[in-house]
């Protein structure tokens, strides 16, 4: 999976299509990511020691990694990623639209 925690991504399918957000967590085994402000679900929580008030809590749920694309900071467009080796021997990700490296 080429998506990492902290990447800016855009949702390309589903009810949140077009929304952008930062990747909060990545689950490589299940091939899922949690994106900030995307795929919000409502949980009905009863009062407990952790949450003394209870009520309806909103959380981001994971979505499949194939439903998001990384947004390049240089060209500000969603694009595919590739890997290339620099002369220094470092392996970096790069935007296939504008050929800029992604940190």
Image (spheres, grey):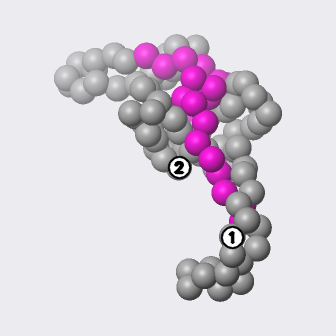
Report x, y in % for residue 38: 70, 44
Above or below — where is 98 with respect to 5? Answer: above
Relative horizontal placement of residue 63, taking residue 84 as reference (left or right) = right
In 3D space, how far apart are the residues under numbered discs 1 and 2 (Cα atoms)?
A: 23 Å
Q: Earlier in the sequence, mark 1 or mark 2?
A: 2
| Residue where numbered disc 2 is placed | 24
- Residue found 44% across the figure and 39% down from its top: 27
Label 1: how many residues lie within 10 Å, few (<14), some (14-19) or many (20+)? few
Residue 37 screen position, x and y as percent: 70, 50
Residue 16 figure quarter:
top right
Residue 73 lies, in percent from the top left, at 58, 34
> At 23% from the left edge and 19% from the top edge, which residue is drawn?
87
- The local crowd at label 2, few if under 14, some if 14 to 19, many if 20 or more residues have their Cα within 10 Å, is some
**Residue identifier under label 1:** 45
In the drawing, does residue 29 fall left or right of residue 87?
A: right
- Please give the label number shown on residue 14: none
Q: Is residue 1 visible?
A: yes
């Amino acid at each position: 999976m080429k998506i990492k925690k902290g990447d800016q991504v855009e949702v390309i399918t589903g009810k949140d299509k077009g929304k952008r957000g930062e990747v909060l967590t990545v689950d490589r085994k299940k091939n899922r990511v949690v994106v900030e402000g995307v795929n919000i679900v409502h949980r009905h929580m009863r009062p407990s020691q952790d949450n003394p008030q209870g009520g309806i809590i909103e959380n981001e749920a994971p979505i499949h990694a194939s439903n998001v694309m990384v947004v390049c900071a240089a060209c500000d467009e969603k694009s595919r990623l590739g890997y290339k080796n620099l002369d220094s021997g470092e392996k970096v990700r790069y935007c296939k639209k504008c050929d800029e490296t992604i940190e």
